[in-house]
Amino acid sequence: MRFQPKEPEEAINYSRESLVREAAVLLFATGLAAAVLFLILGEAIEFAVPRIPVRWEKPIFGTLARALDADDTVIGGAALDELARRIASRWPDNGYEFHVSIAENSMPNAFALPGGGIVVTRGLIEQSESENELAFVLAHELGHFHGRDHLRGFGRAAAFTLLSATLGAATGMGVPDGLTLAQSLTQSGFSRAQESAADEFALDLVHREYGHLGGAFDFFRKDTAGEGGRMAVSWLSTHPSSDDRIERLESLARQRGWGLDGAKRSAVRLNQ
């Protein structure tokens, strides 16, 4: 019998399984592993954050604050530092030394940085119509320091960035969209609890400073330009609606017998 060699099949180097199915399995396995790892890292951060002494924050994270620090020559920066210092003096066991930086951005925003840094945008300052209004914003950020929320947020962001880079290098695809969405939803739910606690902390500090809460909630009553609703600035994005927030804060104030009306002090104004 004579041997008759055959040409190899055209698909010999290809899997007979569906490529779509294989890709789906890979994405699912990668996403599941990433989600489990992210949850483990999150729990580790939750365990570690309350145990980090305040005195360690500035040496460890101070470079971050300096990198985001605004121009110290902006007139009014000293006034913001003084306002933050006055509000913080109403926090008896405060271990921080706060410094307020001004970001040249028209979007109303404010956030806390590890080590005692607070960044406030020019847009937020210019939209504030009284010192009382701005004081509540700063006091709210102090509430995040009180809850160590800034460290939790920084730690989770760092963990997610590291996880994204690792998975991206391993798969060439980055983190699946589903995992990104899940992470965003988890952060949002977690942040709402933090924001409510920071609000309650701010309520106490502002009342201690002024003896009343007049003007403290005015920022939430402003109309959003072009949207016909309430002001929805970036630093409020994880909160319920402004109306619900005002109702909750006013209810808490009444329960404690704190006045909602009182004299407002002149707003801080910045000029270059």
Image (cartoon, helix red, strand yellow):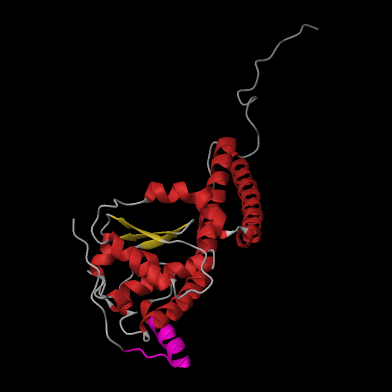
| Tally of numbered tags | 0
In this view of the protein, can residue 156 be seen by the observer?
no
Q: Is residue 236 above or below residue 242?
A: above
Q: Residue furthest left?
A: 272
Image quadrant in which the N terminus is located: top right
Q: Residue furthest right?
A: 1
Q: Which of 38 and 141 lies nearest the eye of the viewer?
A: 141
Question: Horizontal and vertical percent for residue 228?
Answer: 25, 75
Question: Horizontal and vertical percent for residue 4?
Answer: 72, 10
Give the residue drawn at x 65%, y 32%.
15
In this view of the protein, can residue 217 be seen by the observer?
yes
Question: Horizontal and vertical percent for residue 34?
Answer: 62, 49
Is 247 one of the magenta-colored residues?
yes
Image quadrant in which the C terminus is located: bottom left
Give the residue drawn at x 30%, y 88%.
262
Q: Is residue 83 above or below residue 263?
A: above
In the picture provided, is 185 more to the left or to the right than 261? right
Give the residue drawn at x 47%, y 91%.
256
Name the chief secondary structure element in magenta.
Answer: helix
Q: Which of 159 and 181 lies nearest the eye of the viewer?
A: 159
Q: Residue furthest top?
A: 2
In the picture provided, is 47 more to the left or to the right than 207? right
Question: Horizontal and vertical percent for residue 118?
Answer: 40, 60
Is 134 one of the magenta-colored residues?
no
Q: Is residue 12 above or below residue 54?
A: above
Q: Quadrant of residue 117?
A: bottom left
In the rendered structure, which segment of residues is drawn in magenta? 246-261
Q: Quadrant of residue 224?
A: bottom left
Q: Which of 176 and 59 lies nearest the eye of the viewer?
A: 59
In the picture provided, is 183 more to the left or to the right than 116? right
